Image (cartoon, grey):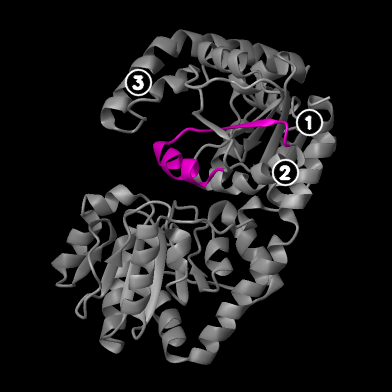
Amino acid sequence: MIGEKGKLLYTVYRALTYGLSPFLYIHLRFRVLQGVEHPVRWPERLGRASTLRPPGHLIWFHTASLGEGMAAIPVIKRCMEEKPDCTILMTSTTASAFEIITTRLPIGVIYQFAPLDIPAAINAFLGYWKPNAIMLMEGELWPNLILGASRNGIALALLNARMSAKSFSRWSQPILLPLISFMLSKFSVIIPLSTMQGIHFQLLQAPPYVINFSGDLKYAVEEFDISKRGVQGIEELKVQLAHRRVWMVSSIHKGEEEVVLGVHKVLMRMYPDMVTIIVPRYPHHGREIAIVQELQKEGLSVALRSRDEKLVSGTSIYVVDTLGELRHFYTLTPIAVIGGSFLPGLTGHNISEAAAAGCAVLTGHHVGHFLDMVLKMQRSNPLSVLQVSAEELVEALSELFSNSAILEVRRLAAKQAFQSLSSGIVANVWNQLNFNVLRQALH
């Protein structure tokens, strides 16, 4: 019965997206004019390929944005090692992901922008690329894509599967539950990033036998090369920071700069030589000088990364308004505060990169689905991650600055917890994909 309702709802969804296609095309062109979409490669969003498809088997990895794309790369590398005769196609939806991911992908991987979930775009994309299997990352559950692939006999996998509380609540509504259940029934394997996420997918009536656990791919942190100029810049900063107290706050959202500024001002009275490194979640906030203006109003000296400004003796704040350098900046600081977590409504960010770099890791209480990562690290080592409120941040940082023994214990605890949790994840995911998807899809 639910299957029939799901088919009916999909028919309605397909008709709606077909009818809205002209307006979505206009919206896409408007986004191009705004600079949100790629100025040249935007037709790829309509399923129009910009390169030739090689002959033979093809596996398509689809991610929404930069974080999911980076998590997929270790699996892509393993896939290329195990299936060297297969072509790998990777797609994402954002221009920021394109800028970074295309510099990190192994040679031979084809990159395209993902098609919009409208019938014409999906049909054109699937008809041209003819993938043997599709690996969707995290929460990319698009009806036309999933059900179009199923109609064409293409195997589907959902990796690092997760759903926000808001999405889970929406899909759980009686009107939409048959549709999501119908979509999830088309997957050969679903690999949730946590037990709770697995329960969510079961409650949405995913077949129990397709749900398999392998761990969170965001623990699969890899080293990436940066440009010669970038390496030189990082080395210069190491020299400039060598004899100063340093802490870094990463991935802050709008409004959190006020929290950071308040903490910085208090700590500066105690530690006049201190440097605060601020990495906005969205670099354009730095480029617009939104954060910098707020800081300069307080009479504080600020250096901006995109301008190659130096950390001179009077500079106490360094704003990193560039993409793709976060992991390298974690190597410059003994203390990392992960933002996107200090204001209600925010949902946290990945803490594993800071732990992998050997930072003492702090984060706020508004961490969304990253709570599972926080709790697992704390269970592995209780000192690995410290959750604090905005009001508690000054005291926590002051303790780390004033007590080198506590700082070193927390740095070591974070590194050890990361190493414990990251072991074997890529191999586990590969084994699930090979057994449940690729053995048949590539037969």
Whether 442 is drawn above or below 373: the answer is: above
**How far across and how far down the image is residue 246, in percent?**
37, 78
**How far across and how far down the image is residue 153, in percent?**
75, 17
Q: Earlier in the sequence, mark 1 or mark 3?
A: 3
Q: Could you tell me which quadrant the N terminus lies in?
A: top right
Kindly report the distance in space between the C-alpha atoms of the residues bearing marks 1 and 2.
Answer: 22 Å
Which residue lies under the disc numbered 2? 81
Q: Is residue 263 visible?
A: no
Left or right: residue 301 versus residue 338 is: left
Kindly report the distance in space between the C-alpha atoms of the residues bearing marks 1 and 3.
Answer: 34 Å
**Region in magenta:** 84-105
Amino acid of disc 3: His
Residue 27: mark: 3
**How far across and how far down the image is residue 339, in percent?**
43, 61
Which residue lies under the disc numbered 1? 188
Secondary structure category for the residue under label 1? loop
